[in-house]
Image (cartoon, grey):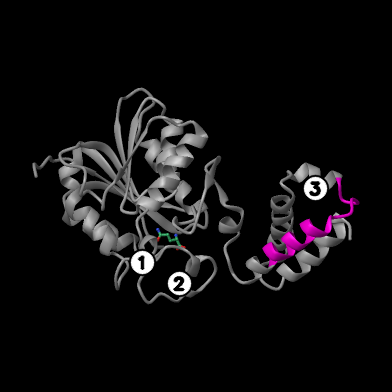
Amino acid sequence: MNVHAVLQVAQTALAEFVNSSEAKLEAQLLLQHALKVNRAWLIAHENDALQANIHAAYRALISRRLNGEPIAYILGVREFYGLQLKVTPDTLIPRPDTETLVEAALGNIPQNKIFCILDLGTGTGALALAIAKHRPHVTVTAVDASQAALNIAIENAQNLNINNVKFMLSDWFSALKNQKFDVIASNPPYIEQNDVHLKQGDLPWEPISALVAGQDGLDAIRHIIQHVQYYLNPHGWLLLEHGYNQAARVADLLNQAGFVEIIHLQDLAGMQRVTLGCYVVTNQP
Ligand code: GLN
């Protein structure tokens, strides 16, 4: 069978599982992965015969995908905010929704100020690395409670040659001592523990600790808001990603904790996905 025919068969099989444009793209991406070639090569070699061993390897990749395994884990990479990131089952797969959080953070980090930034629960390092890349003069501290995730984040920083991120093993603020930051951002777990979405799409394959935060999904966000005051400089900003239906509750929590200028930002689907507020007072631990 030639490349074109093999792609057609795979695309038809995948179309039972994802929509037709995704099926086409995924069929191509998985064949590129099996052949270790780029898209241009695939198009230029449509009529080439596929070697039997490559064809077998490709069929194995397609069956993994049909079994529900996320395409990002099969390929081992995901693009986020223009960065090619390594991802493994130890890390959440970065979502386009989180680009809203990057934009919001960049909007609060002036080009010319030496700010200290903190990313809580960095996972692949997506948020920290996107900020660090676009604000090379700032230092970003990125923490995660999972050493396995942190190892991936460190590898991503090295692969991307981004040198202004400091990685630390820390359960939220636990290892931060008295450090203070000007902007603290987080994409914490925020899904309700009984949410049906946990059984759908990529979610069953992702680390549960990166997804679920108690009965109402707000355990991690409550913890962050309760402790963040000790780590923010006066007039520092806290930016939180949250669930599509949590914006009002997150705003209430911020308001109760003394935050002002609270605003919501929408994701690409028009859902309120990020809430931020400014902390005017300083407290000592
Ligand atoms: N936004 C992801 C989802 O709903 C969840 C990520 C998270 O909990 N931070 O699939």
Label 2–label 3 contact, CB within 8 A: no
User: Does label 1 or label 3 sit earlier along the sequence?
Assistant: 3
Q: Quadrant of ligand 1?
A: bottom left
Q: Which mark is residue 212?
A: 1
Q: Which mark is residue 198?
A: 2
Q: Which residues are magenta?
A: 45-62
Quarter of image, res 245: bottom left
Q: Nearer the viewer, mark 2 or mark 3?
A: 3
| Mark 1 and mark 3: Cα distance apart in space | 40 Å
**What is the quadrant of the C terminus in the image?**
top left
Label 1–label 2 contact, CB within 8 A: yes
Return the x and y of residue 136 as percentages of the image width and height: 41, 27
Q: Does ligand 1 reach within 8 Å of label 1's beta carbon? A: yes
From this viewpoint, which residue is outermost toward the front? 53
Measured along the vertical axis of the image, is residue 113 above or below residue 239? above
Measured along the vertical axis of the image, is residue 269 above or below residue 231? below
Q: Does ligand 1 reach within 8 Å of label 3's beta carbon? A: no
User: Does label 2 or label 3 sit earlier along the sequence?
Assistant: 3
Q: Main secondary structure of the magenta part?
A: helix
| Mark 2 and mark 3: Cα distance apart in space | 35 Å
Measured along the vertical axis of the image, is residue 27 above or below residue 134? below
Disc 3 residue type (three-letter): Leu
Disc 2 residue type (three-letter): Leu
Q: Which mark is residue 42?
A: 3
How crowded pointer 3 is (Cα within 10 Å; few <14, some 14-19, many 20+) is rated as some
Disc 1 residue type (three-letter): Val
Q: Is residue 209 left or right of residue 98?
A: left
Can residue 139 be seen in this snapshot? yes
